[in-house]
Amino acid sequence: MKVLRNIFAFQQNSGGSEFDELMKPIKQIINALTGGSGGSGGSGSAPRQSKGGPSKKIIFLLPIVLITVWLGSGVYVVNPGEVAIVRRFGAWDQQQIAEGLHWHVPTPVEQVDIISISRVRSMELGFRTFGETGNGQTSPDAQEARMITGDENLVDVQLVVQYQISNAGDFLFNVKDPGGTPDITTLRDATASSLRQIVGKKPIDDVLTLGKEQVQIETSLLLQSILDEYGAGIRIVNVQLQDVQPPPEVQAAFKDVISAREDKEKFINQGEAYKEDVVPRARGQAQRDIQDAEAFKFESIAAANGEAARFTSRLLEYNQAKDATERRLYIEALESVLPTIKVIVMDSATSGNVLPFLPLQEISKNETSKSGGTLE
Amino acid sequence: MRKAVVFLVLFIALGAFGANQWLYTLDQTEQAIITKLGEYQRTETSSGLHVKQPFLETVHRLEKRLLRFDAQPSEYLTGEKKALVIDSYARYRIINARTFFEVVRSEPAARARLDSIISSEIREEVASHDQLDVIRDRREELMHDVTVRSNLKAAEFGIEVLDVRIVGADFPADVSVSVYERMQSERTRIANRFRAEGVESKDIIEADANLEQRSILAEAEEQAARTRGEGEAEAIRILGDAIAENPEFFSFVRTLDAYKNLKNSDTTLVLPLETGFYKYIVNDKSSVQP
């Protein structure tokens, strides 16, 4: 496959005509080998069939063509963001070949691995995505996701590690994975170990809520140090916690804690609402009471002033004609009052001895008085 | 012409065979033990093209890369006799090819040896720690100790153990129900605490509000009473000043006002005939003149 691609690249870069030149004798060889008697081999039938020049030509061309094709298979292209590692007889000279068109001594002598160092790859832990990335469906891997927290609770963690190949040589030659060439087993082992180590230090509430960021950072650092120790040639770009949940068996209890936290807020808000309601009203009421008292004060003073003024002015007039005024006021007052109430009048002889007539209340009701009359 | 082809083919075949016997390549990831008729000759660790004696010497290839050993999860007892299922893996490499080749010869055999070494080291370490130490507090130390001691033992067959890591330390399956129950009861505790704290805060806030309300009102009452008192005092002073001019007249006028207040009341007055108002009813001359 790679060889074909290299030949194709060679054709593109060296012009079509040359490629046709290469192809012509190959076709002739194929014709010579298959188009003849179809017997035991080409060597037997070729001389008989080709009496003229072409068969001789083929014999000489054959090795040349084979060598040319072989040499052509050594052409390879390194795209931007890739590096190539060339091994001669299996040995690597520590050189990384940068992007561009290159040639190596073909296969038995040298071999090439082209590795992308710019592509960010990702690995999933605790779940797997099926189908196209981006819209693929995920399914949890409960075994892989379940871990113990520092307070001996269980939690299911799903995480994605994004990584790049930072050193192609290290990546290719330092670590053997079960898949032979580096697969992600090393990374998966190290990630599972470091994540569980970090989560194992933290209480479950940290892992579930505010401590996620910290878990990501610490896991990333620990993971990188493990990979560096292995010389894996992998650089961790990012460790992202996807979904962190308590086990399904206890999720209801965890949800209840969340709603309890909401309830707490609710209660506090209710208290605040009561306070917001009561205190301003009290302030209003207080102001009302105070102003009422002010009004009362004002009224009292005003009334007193009025009364005093009235008294003073009446006194002024009284002083003009003391006796006359006194009599007049007295009579006027009694005149206005006495007609509206019950009055029993008796002479002084009997008035000294009022008791016999008691209870007066009854007497006045019966309106039977012997020695007096009602003024009505 | 035919001879030429036959010769060419023969030449290539012979060349290939000869090269195969004289030469060998080692990949970047390989090292090799060379034996001569079964006897150790030398170790070749550098990769590339190498020469050997044809037919007599045999090349045994070994890995140069870091290798993985994945232990099966198995149950271990902690210091306080609690069971933990520990899943671990190790990373090792062949550092002494000759010893490795002579003692264990192949990777599968090496893994079997590592398995027994590592699991016994883990067993010993876990048994000397409490559960929380294994899970949380002393995990790194534990892994480090296991690594160091496994490494010492593995050196006997030419292996360097770079790292033994605990992937997971989990509760055994039969314990998980009680773990769930513990988790649930703990959550209930926390939920109750939240709710009770909410009620607590609510009560505190409402009590504060009540205190504030009542103190505001009480202060207002106090101030109102003061103000009323001031008003009354002022009124008393004003009236007193006025009355002081002629107290006699005041009591006269004021008494008359009081009489007027009897108006329309359900009051019965018993009056002697000599009262000024009635005195003319009996005697029309004598006491009219003052």
Image (tube, rainbow, N blue to C red):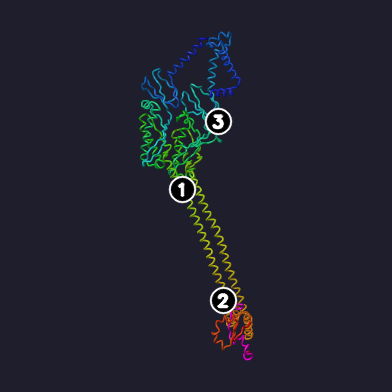
Residue identified by numbered label 3: A80
Q: Is residue B259 visible?
A: yes
Query: Depth-wise, is mark 3 or mark 2 nearer the camera?
Result: 2
Mark seen at residue B188: 1
Residue A21 position in % (x across, y down): 59, 17
Type of residue at label 3? Pro
Residue A269 position in % (x across, y down): 53, 54
The secondary element bearing badge 3 is classed as: loop
The secondary element bearing badge 1 is classed as: helix
Query: Depth-wise, is mark 3 or mark 1 nearer the camera?
Result: 1
Mark 3 → mark 1, Cα distance in angstroms: 58 Å
Task: Determine whether label 1 and label 2 are within 8 Å by CB.
Answer: no
In reply to whether residue B263 is colored magenta, the answer given is yes
B227 relative to B23 in the view: left or right: right
Q: Mark 1 lies on which chain?
A: B
Residue identified by numbered label 2: B237
